[in-house]
Structures are given as C-alpha cells and as structure tokens.
Amino acid sequence: MERILRKQKLSIKVLAVIVLTTIFTACEDSEILDQPSDIYEVTHHYEFNSNIYSIVYELNNEHQVLSAHSDSEGLKSFQEFYKQDEGGLLVVEQVSANGKEVYFKYIAASERKDEGTISGRMECTDWFDPGTASYNFYRHINFVDELVALRKTNTRYFQDQWLGNDNDQISSFRLGNRSELHIFEHSCFFGGEYPFRSDISNLHHVLIGYQISANGNVTPVVRDLNDWISSLKGWSY
C-alpha cells in the first residue's frame, strides 16, 4: 500500500511538472506572437523654392508602410508650387548613410542636365555611348547579387528599353560620379519615371510620396519602387 502511495505521489509530481512546463512554454510562445514587428522610420525631404516639405513613413521589417505623416502647411506650399511648375523635375539628390533619409531636390527646366541630343538615337531602342561613368544594379537590397547583364562601364550615355530576364528585379544600384539615372515603370521608357543622382541601397525606402492630378493638385501617395523597373536611361554630366 505504501509503495502504491509513493507511486501515486511521484505520478502527481511528474504531472505537475508537465503542466507547469506546458503553461510556461505557452506563455513564452504567446509573448513571442504578441510582440509587434520592429518598426522604423524613413523620411523624405522635398526641397523646392528654398522650402522643405517632409514626409515621415513608418515601416515594418517586411518594408510594409504602416503610416505616413506630413506637415499640412508644407504640403499646401508644395501643392501651390507644383501647380506653377513648367517642366522641372524632382531628383533624388542624396540619401543618408543608413538609407532612411531621402533628399529630393527640385530642378528647374533651365537647370536640368539632360542627355542632350544624340544623332541617330531612336526612342524605343537600346543605346550606348562611351565615356567614363559606371552603373551597377543589384537583385537585393544593400548591393547584394549584382545583375551583371545590366552593368555599364566606361559610359557617357546609355539606354536599355527592356531589361529582359532582369525586368522588375532591381532592389539597389550604384552610380558613377556626376551621373544621373532615370528609371521607368514600363518598357520603351513609358509609365512612371523617376530620376536619381545618388546610390540607392534599398529601393523599398524610395516611396514616391506624391502624385499630380490633371488639375495640378498634389496628394501624398506611397509607391514602393523595389522590383518595379522595366527600362533605364543614364548619363554623366
């Protein structure tokens, strides 16, 4: 009888340990599941007419935009300015070392350093003119896994009207000194067009923060340019 009681007590102790372990593990799992994704901020600064308009985005680790905040007065000033725009362009002029501060600068039409005219160059074709600039494109952020077929070296001007197997694959890129790169949403340089004068380590962070309607109104939007590019133009100046 005594031996049976000892076995029962031992069984109860083992069962208690199992129950406590299960509860403790469940609590740990619950805490892990309840923890929100890490959130970080990316800020865009738009410089125009000696003014600065900024948008602050909150993103999670999957690069999903959770919220966007901007100064209403700054937005109004930006809207009024852009209604009077005559052929100018907002260029990504600089990016912070951590890639989370993106600086756009308004370039008036009279100040634009465009590709000029090249005799014989047709719009929907590939083209290459020799020079000193270089361009490197990468499949992943932080300049990982170069898309070698797109690499350009010793270049003054180039255009790729279709990226073939590398279409919608670019996540980061490097530019040579005094170079400008224009990325396009579709082949043959159609669709959205965005210009850069800076290396970009993470295109998830270039969230084009505005759109202009037919009546000239500017509204904040979010457009992630990662895996978005279908044609390219670049030149040195």
Image (cartoon, helix red, strand yellow):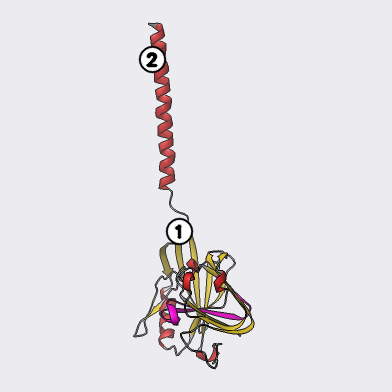
Q: Residue furthest left?
A: 215
Image coordinates of residue 93 in percent, x first then y, are 55, 77
Mark 1 near mark 2, Cβ–Cβ under 8 Å?
Answer: no
Q: Is residue 184 magenta?
A: yes
Residue 65 falls in which quadrant of the image?
bottom left
Pick the residue in front: 84 or 72.
84
Image coordinates of residue 170 in percent, x first then y, are 50, 69
Image coordinates of residue 168 in percent, x first then y, are 45, 70
* Above or below, comparing residue 210 to residue 82 in the picture: above
- The residue carrying mark 2 is 8
- The residue carrying mark 1 is 62
Q: Residue at x 43, y 84 (%)?
A: 82
Residue 186 falls in which quadrant of the image?
bottom left
Q: Quadrant of the N terminus?
A: top left
Q: Is residue 201 magenta?
A: no
Image coordinates of residue 76 in percent, x first then y, are 40, 79
Assign a secondary structure to mark 1: loop
Amino acid bearing label 2: Gln
First of labels 1, 2 by sequence position? 2
Q: Residue at x 42, y 17 (%)?
A: 10
Residue 217 falls in which quadrant of the image?
bottom left
Pick the residue in front: 209 or 72.
209
Assign a secondary structure to mark 2: helix
Bounds of the magenta span?
173-194
Amino acid bearing label 1: Glu
Q: Residues within 10 Å of mark 1 (few under 14, many from 20)?
A: few
* Above or below, comparing residue 117 to residue 140 in the picture: below
* Above or below, comparing residue 201 to residue 52 in the picture: above
Mark 1 and mark 2: Cα distance apart in space: 52 Å
